[in-house]
Amino acid sequence: ISHRSGKPHIDKKAIEEFIKELKYPLYFLDFETINPAIPAYNNSRPFEAIPFQYSLYIIKDKNSKSVRHAYLAPDGKDPRPDILKQLKELLGNSGSIIAYNAIFEKTALRHASEAYTEYQDWVSGLEERIVDLLVPFREFSYYHPGQAGSASLKSVLPVMTKSSYDDMEIADGGMASREYYRVTFGKNIEEKERQRVYNALDKYCDLDTKGMVEIVENLKKVIGK
């Protein structure tokens, strides 16, 4: 029906129920990971997804503007202790942690805490606070024909906001992983090239999280909130 009419399908009741789940402060979180066949760090397994970067937007209450925090591991040392330590401080004890396809972030955190066990209890406690922004799109509570059948963030973001991944040097997670690994662990990489890639990675991860903020804002507009 949506494809025939060219208009989005909107289930306002389902979207309203989803929005009601969100509790301030809101934390919009995105990881980028590497998963090398030969482990790059101690206490890691072959093909384990190791987060090397995060972007986090925090909105304290409905009258506050978002504030961004970010981390990108600057060298070949294990980034997990820094990421766990920083996020434990930033995520506080209450509020919804919003991720897109949240199983990815949950798994990365869980595995990182298995390597650094002092964080296991904290990570376990986060689980009930994590909300998956994929849900209203996977369940077709909102569907725009421009998504072409996909509920991925790359498909949803351009139809719901003015943002898109067009013209970005790094525009998907696979490329982010490959490029980080290349300039961080590769030989004879010039510092200028490394910084070029790191800047592109920051822009990409930033768009993922900023995009989630914009999507939630637009879902609220759809239901008149």
Image (cartoon, rainbow, N blue to C red):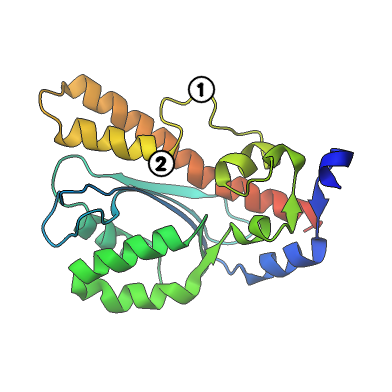
Q: Nearer the viewer, residue 76 or 55?
A: 76
The residue to which callout 1 is attached is: 167
**Total label count?**
2
- Is residue 130 found left or right of 191 in the rendered image? right
Res. 137 mark: none
**Rendered location of residue 114, percent (x, y):** 23, 71
Q: Depth check: 65 or 31 in front?
A: 31
Query: Quarter of the image holding residue 194?
Result: top left
Where residue 75 appears, as percent x and y from the top left, is 16, 40
- In the displayed structure, does residue 71 sit left or right of residue 204? left
Q: Which residue is mark 2?
A: 173
In the image, residue 151 lies at what x, y percent? 62, 49
Residue type (three-letter) at the residue carrying disc 2 = Gly
Quadrant of the frame with the C terminus? bottom right
Q: CA distance from mark 2 to mark 1?
A: 15 Å
Q: Earlier in the sequence, mark 2 or mark 1?
A: 1
Residue at image coords 32%, 40% = 177
Locate residue 99, reporting x and y percent. Answer: 50, 57
Residue sitting at 76 percent across and 51 percent down? Answer: 221
Decide if residue 94 is in sight here: no
Callout 1: SS: loop
For the residue labelled by badge 2, is the local secondary structure a helix, a strand or a loop? helix
Which residue type carries mark 1?
A: Asp
Q: Residues within 10 Å of mark 1 (few under 14, many from 20)?
A: few
